Amino acid sequence: MPTLNELRQHASALRKDNKYDQALAVYRQLWEQPATRNEWDGWGYAHCLRKLGRPREALEVCRQVHQAYPDFEPNRNEYGWSLYDLVLKQDKDAIAKDPGEFFRAAEEILSLAGHDQFSPRVARSSR
């Protein structure tokens, strides 16, 4: 049976190889163990969910991570990207139905995200 550190290394390697579906399973296993999980486990789990087109689930995980580790910058950025993917990337017609949701999400992104290269403050098509 692999050690906790080996599982984390395996999940990270899969994520870095863009094998998000495989990494997701490992990160889920890590995150579902409250006694041993850490902020990186939650971040990796949320990141994989978002990369797999599941921003609503990613946002929920980011909220959990943020509650436990509010100053963890990588999660704050992932939280912002999840909001961006879920709300700000909608088409004009969807945004027009509830512009308040759009502006609330934008304000939340600005309050959460940092100013580093991974920040959603400036959306890039490569993300």
Image (tube, grey):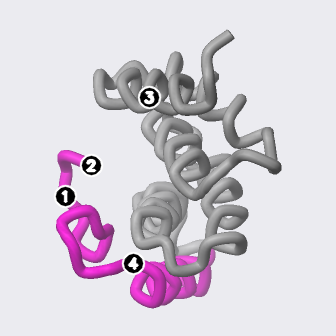
Circle 3 SS class:
helix
Q: Is residue 107 magenta?
A: yes
Q: CA distance from mark 4 to mark 1?
A: 15 Å
Instruction: Tell me where residue 109 appears, x and y as whole percent.
Output: 45, 79
Q: Are marks 2 and 3 in contact (CB under 8 Å)?
A: no
Q: CA distance from mark 2 to mark 4?
A: 15 Å
Question: Is 36 on the left or on the right of 111, as rendered?
Answer: right
User: Which label is found at residue 18?
Assistant: none
**Eyeballing the image, is 60 above or below 21?**
below
Q: Is residue 19 magenta?
A: no
Q: Residue at x 81, y 49 (%)?
A: 35
**Given the image, on which type of amino acid does mark 2 rest?**
Arg
Q: Which residue is mark 1?
A: 124
Q: What's the magenta region?
A: 98-127
**Eyeballing the image, is 33 above or below 114?**
above
Q: Which residue is mark 4?
A: 113
Whether residue 92 is visible, yes or no, is no
* Mark positioned earlier in the residue sequence (3 or 1): 3
Q: Which residue is mark 2?
A: 127
Question: Is 12 on the left or on the right of 101, as rendered?
Answer: left
Query: Which of the two marks, 3 or 4, is nearer to us in this view?
Result: 3
Q: Which residue is mark 3?
A: 9
Callout 3: 10 Å neighbours few (<14), some, many (20+)? few
